[in-house]
Amino acid sequence: MTRVDDAPGRLAGRVAVVTGASRGIGFAIARRLAEEGASLVLTARGEEGLAEAAAALPAERVRTVAGRAQDPDHQAESVAVAVREFGGLDILVANAGINPVYGPLLGLEHEAARKVLDVNVLGTLAWVQAACAAGLGERPGASVLAMSSVTGAVPSPGIGWYGVSKAAVSHLTVTLAAELGPRIRVNALAPAVVRTRFARALYEGREEEVAARYPAGRLGEPGDVANAAAFLCSDDAGWLTGQVLTLDGGLRAAGGVA
């Protein structure tokens, strides 16, 4: 990974916690926020992946905390590190999510379904609760960015339950925006298929065929999501809250599904 240079930006002086940040979309968002000047606490399950991600960012502006995203102790520790190491908390990016099931809903195992909701929905809410308890919203410009999906708006074959969980995240975003304003803005991103390890089952071995359904002519890249994330977390989006921004290369406009 190419290292981010230390440079001022529109997030200079801000402190962010980014979950699921060791690779893929989470790391791309963390990197983009660092480029904009933010100090970061990165979280993910694996210490090795976190260490590799942190090595590409300015050492004085990054800390890592390994743990399970849905673990309350891990959540509390992560936001506490932000306050202790950097003096406060301004941005929460609740990116961590899972999808261990594939297939029609009639064959869905309830234990797996509960786990998806626990991480994707309850986990997102719990991170917001932990961040607010640690002082998010006490300083101007506070924001929360959740991670939804186009599957939360349009049924997608094989990943229907994941879509159900992301529909809940979208509604959670709007509800939190109404409850937490004006101190905290709350928005979400809803990507279609992005070229990551997490989504590779949706395009691997047939990327040209899948990309042909997108008016933009290609699948998403992590950087596409990261650029939108940086905007929503900055004061440039100061009058945006309660929004779920679709990032899909025109897929839904063309009547497609992820």
Image (spheres, grey):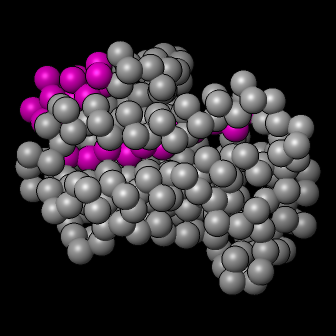
Question: Does 13 sit left or right of 143 as displayed?
Answer: left
Q: Is residue 176 above or below residue 126?
A: below
Q: Is residue 194 a member of the stretch shown in magenta? A: no
- The residue depicted at 59 percent of the width and 52 percent of the height is 166
Compared to 46, does 218 lie above or below? below
Count of numbered circles in the view: 0
The residue located at (29%, 19%) in the rendering is: 77
Span of residues in magenta: 76-100
Q: For this view, does 1 lie left or right of residue 209?
A: left
Which residue is depicted at the point 59% across and 56% down?
167
- Can residue 90 be seen from the camera position used here? yes
Q: Is residue 79 magenta?
A: yes
* Residue 95, position as x, y percentages in the image: 48, 43
Front position in the image: 252 or 152: 152
51 sits to left or right of 118: left
Q: Is residue 72 above or below residue 255?
A: above
| Rendered residue at 91%/51% (across/down) | 205
Quadrant position of the C terminus in the picture: bottom right
Residue 174 locus on image (x, y percent): 39, 62
The quadrant holding residue 228 is bottom left
Percent across and percent down for residue 57 are 35, 37
**Residue 63 visible from this viewpoint:** no
Where residue 229 appears, as percent x and y from the top left, is: 40, 59
